[in-house]
Image (tube, rainbow, N blue to C red):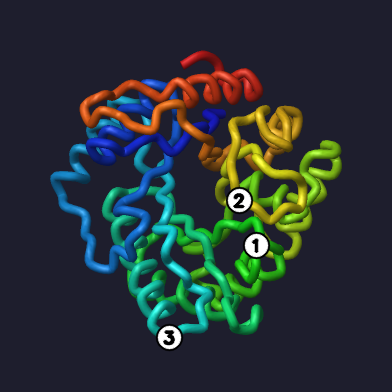
């Protein structure tokens, strides 16, 4: 089986260049932003020429559009009790889905946001209603995927019960358009024991699957700069943080990772990248070599 292993490469020069950098590292999947992640992007579209260039670059890299994952803007707070923020986030997530569909990607993942001064249960329901609005507004097959969080403050999505309540707001006939994914740094920081033993890691995955009713649709592979239960979302290169290398080997041996995107969001060696440089970051090259060795996926 072809393993879907990749990262979120630099998009300096556009998303087509991100695809070229993924190809340079031998990736079989990648994650991108379809608009600047520090803006709501409610009016940002996706021009046909941009899609064509992206698809051409993917074809050269040997990556299928349907194996691409999009990450939504960080500023979208779909859990906010503040009407203006919640409304902008609802519009923004629908536009994220629109752009994701335009490039033919598998799905769009997003951080649910913070309940702020509000009630956690009401916040989870708001997140779910925002997901429902997106998939009802834009018919198709592209998915909207909740990403678990590190659980700082009143950030939503730390526990499987919260994600289950979000997804429960989507009608049964549209549930195939939704789902969730798991970030290893976020799990570890939120106090889910994925590092003490293979059985413990498997138990965490089992619990999410049992409570939510389905397995994860993607994994973000990130070590953690901070200790277990810190609630701090700070990624580290695999093996250079508090999680270590063994848990990632256990995870990649779990059947649930076999057919879904497994995406690195680990630090890059180079903060600045020339727009016309198609070369992969050296840190991505090192991390991809580890993933291939751990999965037996072979050389690039």
Give the crowd class for mark 1: few <14, some 14-19, many >=20 residues within 10 Å: some
Name the residue rendered at 53%, 75% in the picture. Answer: 79
Disc 3 or 2, which lies upstream in sequence? Answer: 3
Name the residue rendered at 57%, 39% in the picture. Answer: 259
> Mark 3 touching mark 2, by CB under 8 A?
no
Q: Is residue 193 left or right of residue 218?
A: right
Q: Is residue 29 left or right of residue 222?
A: left
The circle on residue 252 is none
Q: Is residue 21 left or right of residue 241?
A: left
The circle on residue 152 is 1
Q: Position of residue 271 (x, y in %)?
A: 39, 33
Q: Nearer the viewer, residue 23 or 277?
A: 277
Gap in angstroms between the C-alphas marked 2 and 1: 8 Å
Q: Position of residue 68 (x, y in %)?
A: 40, 42
Q: Position of residue 72 (x, y in %)?
A: 41, 57
Relative vertical location of residue 55 with respect to residue 127 in this rendering, above or below: above
Disc 2 or 1, which lies upstream in sequence? Answer: 1
Location of the N terminus (image quadrant)? top right
Residue beneath disc 2: 233
Name the residue rendered at 56%, 47% in the picture. Answer: 218
Q: Nearer the viewer, residue 220 or 29?
A: 220
Give the crowd class for mark 3: few <14, some 14-19, many >=20 residues within 10 Å: few
Disc 3 or 1, which lies upstream in sequence? Answer: 3
Q: Position of residue 43 (x, y in %)?
A: 23, 67
Name the residue rendered at 60%, 36% in the picture. Answer: 236
Relative vertical location of residue 42 with respect to residue 259 in this rendering, above or below: below
Residue beneath disc 3: 83
> Mark 3 touching mark 1, by CB under 8 A?
no
Give the crowd class for mark 2: few <14, some 14-19, many >=20 residues within 10 Å: many
> Mark 2 touching mark 1, by CB under 8 A?
yes
């Amino acid at each position: 089986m072809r393993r879907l292993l990749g990262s979120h490469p630099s998009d300096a020069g556009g998303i087509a260049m991100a695809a070229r950098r993924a190809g340079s590292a031998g990736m079989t999947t990648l994650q991108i932003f379809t608009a600047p992640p520090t803006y709501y992007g409610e009016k940002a579209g996706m021009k046909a020429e941009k899609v064509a260039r992206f698809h051409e670059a993917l074809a050269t890299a040997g990556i299928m559009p349907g194996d691409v994952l999009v990450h939504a803007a960080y500023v979208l707070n779909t859990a906010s009790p503040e009407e203006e923020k919640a409304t902008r986030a609802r519009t923004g997530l629908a536009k994220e889905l629109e752009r994701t569909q335009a490039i033919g990607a598998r799905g769009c993942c997003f951080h649910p946001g913070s309940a702020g001064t509000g009630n956690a249960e009401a916040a989870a329901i708001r997140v779910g209603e925002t997901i429902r609005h997106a998939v009802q507004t834009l018919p198709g097959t592209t998915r909207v995927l909740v990403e678990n969080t590190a659980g700082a403050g009143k950030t939503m999505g730390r526990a499987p019960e919260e994600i289950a309540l979000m997804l429960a707001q989507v009608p049964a006939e549209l549930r195939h358009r939704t789902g969730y994914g798991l970030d290893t740094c976020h799990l570890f920081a939120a106090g889910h024991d994925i590092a003490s033993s293979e059985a413990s890691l498997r138990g965490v995955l089992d619990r999410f699957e049992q409570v939510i009713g389905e397995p994860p649709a993607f994994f973000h592979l990130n070590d953690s700069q901070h200790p277990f239960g810190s609630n701090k979302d700070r990624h580290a290169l695999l093996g250079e943080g508090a999680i270590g290398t063994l848990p990632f080997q256990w995870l990649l041996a779990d059947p649930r990772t076999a057919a879904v995107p497994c995406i690195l969001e680990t630090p890059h060696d180079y903060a600045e990248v020339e727009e016309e440089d198609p070369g992969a970051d050296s840190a991505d090259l090192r991390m991809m070599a580890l993933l291939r060795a751990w999965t037996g996926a072979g050389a690039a």
